Amino acid sequence: MSTFSETEERQELRKQVAKLASKYGREYFAEKARSGEKTTDLWLELGRAGYLGINVPEEYGGGGGGIGDIAAVCEELAAQGCPMLLMVVSPAICGTVIAKYGTEEQKQKWLPGICDRTGTMAFAITEPDAGTNTHNITTTARRDGDEWVLKGRKIWISGVDEASNVLVVARAEDAKTGKVKPVLFVVPTDAPGFESNAIPMEIVSPEKQFQVFIDDVRLPADALVGDENGGLAQLFAGLNPERIMASSFNTGIARFALDRAVAYAKEREVFQGPIGGHQAIAHPLAQSHIEIEMARLMTQKAAALYDEGDEFAAGEAANMAKYASAEAACDAADRAVQTHGGFGASQEYGVAGLLVATRVGRIAPVSREMILNFVSMHSLGLPKSY
Protein backbone atom coordinates (compact mmCIF):
# COMPACT_ATOMS: atom_id res chain seq x y z
CA MET A 1 0.00 0.00 0.00
CA SER A 2 1.26 3.49 -0.85
CA THR A 3 2.22 5.76 2.02
CA PHE A 4 0.08 8.41 0.37
CA SER A 5 -3.18 6.54 0.30
CA GLU A 6 -5.46 5.80 3.21
CA THR A 7 -6.21 2.30 4.44
CA GLU A 8 -9.06 0.36 2.88
CA GLU A 9 -10.95 0.72 6.18
CA ARG A 10 -10.61 4.51 6.08
CA GLN A 11 -11.70 4.64 2.44
CA GLU A 12 -14.73 2.47 3.24
CA LEU A 13 -15.53 4.73 6.21
CA ARG A 14 -15.51 7.75 3.89
CA LYS A 15 -17.78 5.98 1.42
CA GLN A 16 -20.33 4.99 4.07
CA VAL A 17 -20.41 8.45 5.70
CA ALA A 18 -20.84 10.10 2.30
CA LYS A 19 -23.68 7.69 1.52
CA LEU A 20 -25.42 8.49 4.81
CA ALA A 21 -24.95 12.26 4.47
CA SER A 22 -26.10 12.31 0.83
CA LYS A 23 -29.59 11.28 2.03
CA TYR A 24 -29.74 14.68 3.73
CA GLY A 25 -27.57 17.01 1.61
CA ARG A 26 -27.16 20.78 1.37
CA GLU A 27 -30.85 21.53 0.86
CA TYR A 28 -31.75 19.80 4.14
CA PHE A 29 -28.91 21.55 5.95
CA ALA A 30 -29.75 25.02 4.61
CA GLU A 31 -33.48 24.58 5.23
CA LYS A 32 -32.86 23.66 8.88
CA ALA A 33 -30.47 26.58 9.32
CA ARG A 34 -32.83 29.16 7.79
CA SER A 35 -35.82 27.97 9.80
CA GLY A 36 -33.87 28.05 13.07
CA GLU A 37 -34.08 24.26 13.47
CA LYS A 38 -31.32 21.78 14.27
CA THR A 39 -29.93 18.91 12.19
CA THR A 40 -30.81 16.48 14.98
CA ASP A 41 -31.96 13.69 12.63
CA LEU A 42 -28.59 13.61 10.92
CA TRP A 43 -26.69 13.83 14.22
CA LEU A 44 -28.60 10.94 15.76
CA GLU A 45 -28.18 8.74 12.68
CA LEU A 46 -24.44 9.44 12.74
CA GLY A 47 -24.41 8.49 16.42
CA ARG A 48 -26.33 5.26 15.81
CA ALA A 49 -23.90 4.31 13.05
CA GLY A 50 -20.97 4.83 15.43
CA TYR A 51 -19.39 7.67 13.46
CA LEU A 52 -19.55 10.46 16.06
CA GLY A 53 -17.22 8.85 18.57
CA ILE A 54 -15.09 6.86 16.16
CA ASN A 55 -11.94 8.30 17.80
CA VAL A 56 -13.07 7.53 21.38
CA PRO A 57 -11.84 4.29 23.04
CA GLU A 58 -14.20 1.34 22.57
CA GLU A 59 -14.76 0.78 26.30
CA TYR A 60 -16.54 4.15 26.47
CA GLY A 61 -18.83 3.61 23.50
CA GLY A 62 -16.44 4.77 20.78
CA GLY A 63 -14.88 3.15 17.75
CA GLY A 64 -11.31 3.01 19.05
CA GLY A 65 -9.98 4.82 15.98
CA GLY A 66 -7.66 7.78 15.62
CA ILE A 67 -8.03 11.47 14.87
CA GLY A 68 -7.66 10.66 11.17
CA ASP A 69 -10.88 8.65 11.32
CA ILE A 70 -13.02 11.35 12.93
CA ALA A 71 -11.46 13.91 10.56
CA ALA A 72 -12.52 11.73 7.60
CA VAL A 73 -16.09 11.67 8.93
CA CYS A 74 -16.04 15.45 9.32
CA GLU A 75 -14.73 15.98 5.77
CA GLU A 76 -17.20 13.67 4.07
CA LEU A 77 -20.15 15.31 5.84
CA ALA A 78 -19.00 18.75 4.67
CA ALA A 79 -18.38 17.45 1.15
CA GLN A 80 -22.08 16.45 1.02
CA GLY A 81 -23.10 19.98 2.04
CA CYS A 82 -23.53 19.23 5.75
CA PRO A 83 -20.56 20.78 7.58
CA MET A 84 -21.08 19.82 11.23
CA LEU A 85 -19.11 22.30 13.33
CA LEU A 86 -19.76 20.52 16.63
CA MET A 87 -17.85 17.49 15.33
CA VAL A 88 -14.72 19.62 15.65
CA VAL A 89 -15.64 20.50 19.22
CA SER A 90 -17.39 17.59 20.92
CA PRO A 91 -15.65 14.34 19.90
CA ALA A 92 -12.34 15.83 18.73
CA ILE A 93 -11.47 18.45 21.35
CA CYS A 94 -13.51 17.44 24.40
CA GLY A 95 -13.43 13.71 23.64
CA THR A 96 -9.65 13.77 23.25
CA VAL A 97 -8.97 15.80 26.42
CA ILE A 98 -11.25 13.65 28.59
CA ALA A 99 -10.01 10.36 27.11
CA LYS A 100 -6.40 11.45 27.72
CA TYR A 101 -6.63 13.18 31.08
CA GLY A 102 -9.99 12.37 32.68
CA THR A 103 -10.41 9.99 35.60
CA GLU A 104 -12.01 6.62 34.97
CA GLU A 105 -15.26 7.95 36.45
CA GLN A 106 -15.17 11.01 34.19
CA LYS A 107 -14.61 8.89 31.10
CA GLN A 108 -17.53 6.64 32.02
CA LYS A 109 -19.71 9.66 32.77
CA TRP A 110 -19.10 11.84 29.71
CA LEU A 111 -17.59 9.91 26.80
CA PRO A 112 -20.60 7.67 25.93
CA GLY A 113 -22.83 10.77 25.55
CA ILE A 114 -20.26 12.38 23.26
CA CYS A 115 -20.30 9.21 21.13
CA ASP A 116 -24.07 8.87 20.71
CA ARG A 117 -24.83 12.63 20.70
CA THR A 118 -26.99 12.47 23.83
CA GLY A 119 -24.29 14.33 25.78
CA THR A 120 -22.73 16.72 23.28
CA MET A 121 -20.02 18.87 24.88
CA ALA A 122 -19.02 22.40 23.86
CA PHE A 123 -15.59 23.96 24.44
CA ALA A 124 -14.99 27.42 25.93
CA ILE A 125 -11.56 29.00 25.74
CA THR A 126 -11.85 32.34 23.87
CA GLU A 127 -12.62 35.50 25.85
CA PRO A 128 -13.66 39.01 24.77
CA ASP A 129 -10.43 40.61 25.98
CA ALA A 130 -8.02 37.72 25.37
CA GLY A 131 -8.70 36.56 21.81
CA THR A 132 -5.81 34.41 20.60
CA ASN A 133 -3.71 35.23 23.67
CA THR A 134 -4.57 32.28 25.93
CA HIS A 135 -2.25 33.66 28.64
CA ASN A 136 -4.63 36.60 29.14
CA ILE A 137 -7.63 34.46 30.11
CA THR A 138 -9.35 36.01 33.13
CA THR A 139 -12.03 33.41 33.90
CA THR A 140 -11.04 32.33 37.40
CA ALA A 141 -11.50 29.16 39.41
CA ARG A 142 -11.19 29.34 43.17
CA ARG A 143 -11.50 26.64 45.77
CA ASP A 144 -14.27 26.80 48.33
CA GLY A 145 -14.09 23.80 50.61
CA ASP A 146 -14.67 20.71 48.49
CA GLU A 147 -16.04 22.78 45.63
CA TRP A 148 -14.77 25.08 42.90
CA VAL A 149 -16.32 28.45 42.04
CA LEU A 150 -15.98 29.74 38.48
CA LYS A 151 -16.39 33.34 37.35
CA GLY A 152 -15.76 34.95 33.96
CA ARG A 153 -16.88 35.48 30.38
CA LYS A 154 -16.34 33.59 27.12
CA ILE A 155 -17.14 34.44 23.51
CA TRP A 156 -17.45 32.60 20.15
CA ILE A 157 -18.51 29.39 21.88
CA SER A 158 -20.12 27.02 19.38
CA GLY A 159 -23.32 25.08 19.99
CA VAL A 160 -24.01 25.89 23.64
CA ASP A 161 -27.72 25.41 22.96
CA GLU A 162 -27.07 21.85 21.75
CA ALA A 163 -24.66 20.87 24.51
CA SER A 164 -25.33 19.27 27.88
CA ASN A 165 -21.96 20.44 29.18
CA VAL A 166 -19.17 22.84 28.30
CA LEU A 167 -15.47 22.14 28.83
CA VAL A 168 -14.34 25.50 30.23
CA VAL A 169 -10.75 26.73 30.39
CA ALA A 170 -10.17 28.80 33.54
CA ARG A 171 -7.24 29.97 35.65
CA ALA A 172 -6.61 28.87 39.22
CA GLU A 173 -4.06 30.21 41.66
CA ASP A 174 -1.37 27.83 42.78
CA ALA A 175 -1.52 27.86 46.59
CA LYS A 176 2.25 27.24 46.86
CA THR A 177 3.65 29.65 44.27
CA GLY A 178 0.84 32.19 43.92
CA LYS A 179 1.08 31.87 40.13
CA VAL A 180 -1.99 31.30 37.98
CA LYS A 181 -2.30 28.14 35.91
CA PRO A 182 -4.81 26.90 33.32
CA VAL A 183 -7.35 24.35 34.55
CA LEU A 184 -10.22 22.58 32.78
CA PHE A 185 -13.74 22.05 34.12
CA VAL A 186 -16.84 20.34 32.78
CA VAL A 187 -19.70 22.78 33.43
CA PRO A 188 -23.36 21.74 32.92
CA THR A 189 -25.15 24.24 30.65
CA ASP A 190 -28.08 24.31 33.11
CA ALA A 191 -25.88 25.16 36.12
CA PRO A 192 -27.08 28.14 38.22
CA GLY A 193 -25.06 31.20 37.21
CA PHE A 194 -24.29 29.92 33.71
CA GLU A 195 -25.92 32.03 30.99
CA SER A 196 -25.46 32.35 27.24
CA ASN A 197 -26.58 34.76 24.53
CA ALA A 198 -26.57 33.88 20.83
CA ILE A 199 -24.46 36.15 18.60
CA PRO A 200 -26.25 37.13 15.35
CA MET A 201 -24.21 35.68 12.47
CA GLU A 202 -24.25 35.98 8.67
CA ILE A 203 -23.29 32.32 8.25
CA VAL A 204 -26.03 29.92 7.13
CA SER A 205 -25.62 27.23 9.77
CA PRO A 206 -27.90 25.50 12.29
CA GLU A 207 -25.03 25.68 14.78
CA LYS A 208 -24.96 29.01 16.59
CA GLN A 209 -22.20 31.03 18.30
CA PHE A 210 -22.60 32.30 21.84
CA GLN A 211 -21.31 34.71 24.41
CA VAL A 212 -21.21 32.95 27.78
CA PHE A 213 -21.45 34.47 31.26
CA ILE A 214 -20.18 32.43 34.21
CA ASP A 215 -21.29 34.09 37.43
CA ASP A 216 -20.06 32.22 40.52
CA VAL A 217 -20.92 28.81 39.12
CA ARG A 218 -20.33 26.21 41.84
CA LEU A 219 -18.88 22.87 40.78
CA PRO A 220 -18.06 19.66 42.63
CA ALA A 221 -14.41 18.59 42.91
CA ASP A 222 -14.86 15.95 40.20
CA ALA A 223 -15.74 18.60 37.60
CA LEU A 224 -12.01 19.30 37.32
CA VAL A 225 -10.59 17.38 34.35
CA GLY A 226 -7.10 15.98 34.69
CA ASP A 227 -4.41 17.10 37.08
CA GLU A 228 -4.90 20.48 38.68
CA ASN A 229 -1.19 21.08 38.02
CA GLY A 230 -1.20 19.58 34.53
CA GLY A 231 -0.88 23.02 33.02
CA LEU A 232 -0.76 23.81 29.34
CA ALA A 233 -0.16 20.21 28.22
CA GLN A 234 -3.75 19.28 29.07
CA LEU A 235 -5.15 22.41 27.47
CA PHE A 236 -3.18 21.95 24.26
CA ALA A 237 -4.10 18.25 24.04
CA GLY A 238 -7.29 19.26 22.26
CA LEU A 239 -5.78 21.93 20.02
CA ASN A 240 -3.92 19.74 17.51
CA PRO A 241 -7.08 17.65 16.98
CA GLU A 242 -9.01 20.94 16.64
CA ARG A 243 -6.73 22.14 13.82
CA ILE A 244 -6.81 18.77 12.05
CA MET A 245 -10.61 18.71 12.24
CA ALA A 246 -10.85 22.33 11.07
CA SER A 247 -8.72 21.37 8.06
CA SER A 248 -11.04 18.50 7.18
CA PHE A 249 -14.05 20.77 7.72
CA ASN A 250 -12.49 23.28 5.28
CA THR A 251 -11.47 20.75 2.63
CA GLY A 252 -14.93 19.17 2.80
CA ILE A 253 -16.64 22.51 2.16
CA ALA A 254 -14.11 23.22 -0.61
CA ARG A 255 -14.91 19.89 -2.28
CA PHE A 256 -18.61 20.65 -2.08
CA ALA A 257 -18.12 24.09 -3.67
CA LEU A 258 -15.94 22.63 -6.42
CA ASP A 259 -18.40 19.79 -7.14
CA ARG A 260 -21.23 22.30 -7.55
CA ALA A 261 -19.11 24.49 -9.82
CA VAL A 262 -17.97 21.58 -12.01
CA ALA A 263 -21.50 20.22 -12.38
CA TYR A 264 -22.75 23.66 -13.46
CA ALA A 265 -19.82 24.20 -15.84
CA LYS A 266 -20.60 20.92 -17.59
CA GLU A 267 -24.25 21.71 -18.26
CA ARG A 268 -24.45 25.50 -18.67
CA GLU A 269 -24.22 26.67 -22.30
CA VAL A 270 -23.86 30.33 -23.29
CA PHE A 271 -21.93 30.51 -26.58
CA GLN A 272 -20.84 27.22 -28.16
CA GLY A 273 -20.94 24.20 -25.88
CA PRO A 274 -20.69 24.03 -22.08
CA ILE A 275 -18.91 26.91 -20.32
CA GLY A 276 -16.51 24.37 -18.79
CA GLY A 277 -14.91 24.09 -22.24
CA HIS A 278 -13.51 27.61 -21.83
CA GLN A 279 -10.16 27.83 -20.07
CA ALA A 280 -11.27 30.94 -18.17
CA ILE A 281 -13.74 28.66 -16.35
CA ALA A 282 -11.82 25.37 -16.47
CA HIS A 283 -8.43 26.56 -15.23
CA PRO A 284 -9.55 28.14 -11.93
CA LEU A 285 -11.53 24.98 -11.15
CA ALA A 286 -8.52 22.80 -11.96
CA GLN A 287 -6.43 25.06 -9.74
CA SER A 288 -8.89 24.55 -6.87
CA HIS A 289 -8.74 20.79 -7.31
CA ILE A 290 -4.94 20.93 -6.96
CA GLU A 291 -5.09 23.21 -3.91
CA ILE A 292 -7.70 21.02 -2.19
CA GLU A 293 -5.74 17.82 -2.78
CA MET A 294 -2.55 19.40 -1.39
CA ALA A 295 -4.41 20.55 1.72
CA ARG A 296 -5.99 17.10 2.16
CA LEU A 297 -2.58 15.44 1.95
CA MET A 298 -1.14 17.75 4.61
CA THR A 299 -4.17 17.09 6.81
CA GLN A 300 -3.60 13.34 6.38
CA LYS A 301 0.06 13.81 7.37
CA ALA A 302 -0.91 15.81 10.47
CA ALA A 303 -3.42 13.14 11.55
CA ALA A 304 -0.91 10.34 11.02
CA LEU A 305 1.77 12.14 13.06
CA TYR A 306 -0.75 12.88 15.83
CA ASP A 307 -1.96 9.28 15.96
CA GLU A 308 1.70 8.15 16.15
CA GLY A 309 2.17 10.38 19.21
CA ASP A 310 4.60 12.85 17.64
CA GLU A 311 3.05 15.96 19.18
CA PHE A 312 5.48 18.59 17.92
CA ALA A 313 5.62 17.38 14.32
CA ALA A 314 1.83 16.97 14.41
CA GLY A 315 1.49 20.56 15.64
CA GLU A 316 3.58 21.91 12.77
CA ALA A 317 1.71 19.85 10.18
CA ALA A 318 -1.71 20.62 11.70
CA ASN A 319 -1.04 24.35 11.55
CA MET A 320 0.13 24.09 7.94
CA ALA A 321 -2.90 21.98 7.03
CA LYS A 322 -5.26 24.45 8.67
CA TYR A 323 -3.65 27.33 6.72
CA ALA A 324 -3.68 25.52 3.38
CA SER A 325 -7.23 24.22 3.77
CA ALA A 326 -8.67 27.64 4.61
CA GLU A 327 -6.99 29.22 1.58
CA ALA A 328 -8.19 26.38 -0.67
CA ALA A 329 -11.75 26.66 0.66
CA CYS A 330 -11.93 30.45 0.22
CA ASP A 331 -10.68 30.16 -3.36
CA ALA A 332 -13.02 27.26 -4.18
CA ALA A 333 -16.07 29.13 -2.87
CA ASP A 334 -15.13 32.29 -4.78
CA ARG A 335 -14.58 30.34 -8.00
CA ALA A 336 -17.84 28.43 -7.53
CA VAL A 337 -19.77 31.71 -7.29
CA GLN A 338 -17.95 33.12 -10.34
CA THR A 339 -18.65 29.97 -12.37
CA HIS A 340 -22.36 30.30 -11.66
CA GLY A 341 -22.44 33.94 -12.79
CA GLY A 342 -25.57 35.71 -11.53
CA PHE A 343 -26.96 32.41 -10.22
CA GLY A 344 -23.97 32.28 -7.86
CA ALA A 345 -25.65 34.91 -5.70
CA SER A 346 -28.97 33.05 -5.54
CA GLN A 347 -30.15 30.78 -2.75
CA GLU A 348 -31.18 28.18 -5.28
CA TYR A 349 -27.65 27.10 -6.19
CA GLY A 350 -26.34 27.05 -2.62
CA VAL A 351 -22.86 28.50 -3.16
CA ALA A 352 -23.14 32.17 -2.10
CA GLY A 353 -23.43 31.30 1.60
CA LEU A 354 -20.11 29.46 1.36
CA LEU A 355 -18.28 32.76 0.88
CA VAL A 356 -18.80 33.75 4.52
CA ALA A 357 -18.47 30.20 5.87
CA THR A 358 -15.10 29.63 4.19
CA ARG A 359 -13.82 33.10 5.06
CA VAL A 360 -14.24 32.32 8.76
CA GLY A 361 -11.83 29.43 8.20
CA ARG A 362 -9.01 31.95 7.84
CA ILE A 363 -9.79 33.24 11.35
CA ALA A 364 -10.95 30.27 13.42
CA PRO A 365 -9.99 28.21 15.31
CA VAL A 366 -6.64 29.97 14.91
CA SER A 367 -5.95 32.88 12.58
CA ARG A 368 -3.65 32.50 9.60
CA GLU A 369 -1.45 35.25 11.07
CA MET A 370 -0.86 33.18 14.23
CA ILE A 371 -0.09 30.15 12.06
CA LEU A 372 2.48 32.22 10.16
CA ASN A 373 3.91 33.29 13.54
CA PHE A 374 4.19 29.62 14.54
CA VAL A 375 5.87 28.60 11.30
CA SER A 376 8.22 31.62 11.33
CA MET A 377 9.34 30.83 14.87
CA HIS A 378 9.24 27.04 15.14
CA SER A 379 9.84 25.87 11.57
CA LEU A 380 12.23 28.61 10.41
CA GLY A 381 13.84 29.59 13.72
CA LEU A 382 13.09 33.29 13.32
CA PRO A 383 12.76 35.57 16.38
CA LYS A 384 9.43 35.53 18.21
CA SER A 385 7.28 38.50 17.18
CA TYR A 386 4.51 38.47 19.78
Image (tube, rainbow, N blue to C red):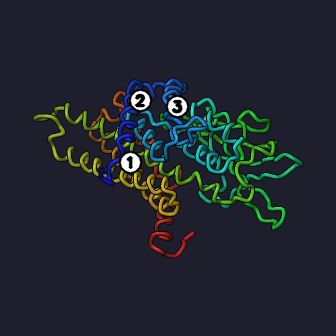
User: What secondary structure is found at the residue carrying circle 3?
Assistant: loop
Question: Is tag 3's residue or tag 2's residue first in the polypeptide sequence?
Answer: 2
- Image coordinates for residue 228, horizontal then vertical, percent: 75, 55
**Quarter of the image where the C terminus is located:** bottom right
Q: Total of numbered circles in the picture?
A: 3
Estimate the spatial distance between the alpha carbons at disc 3 and disc 1, rounded to whole Å.
Answer: 21 Å
Q: Is residue 83 visible?
A: yes
Q: Which residue does the numbered mark 2 point to in the structure image?
A: 21
How dense is the environment of label 1, judged by Cα within 10 Å: few (below 14), some, or many (20 and up)?
Answer: many
User: What secondary structure is found at the residue carrying circle 2?
Assistant: helix
State the residue at coordinates (67%, 44%).
Answer: 167
Q: Which residue does the numbered mark 1 point to in the structure image?
A: 330
Q: Which residue does the numbered mark 3 point to in the structure image?
A: 206
State the residue at coordinates (51%, 63%).
Answer: 312
Classify residue 141 as left or right of residue 320. Answer: right
- Image coordinates for residue 283, horizontal then vertical, percent: 21, 48
Q: Is residue 322 visible?
A: no
**Residue type pointed to by label 3:** Pro
State the residue at coordinates (54%, 71%).
Answer: 385
Classify residue 239 as left or right of residue 68. Answer: right
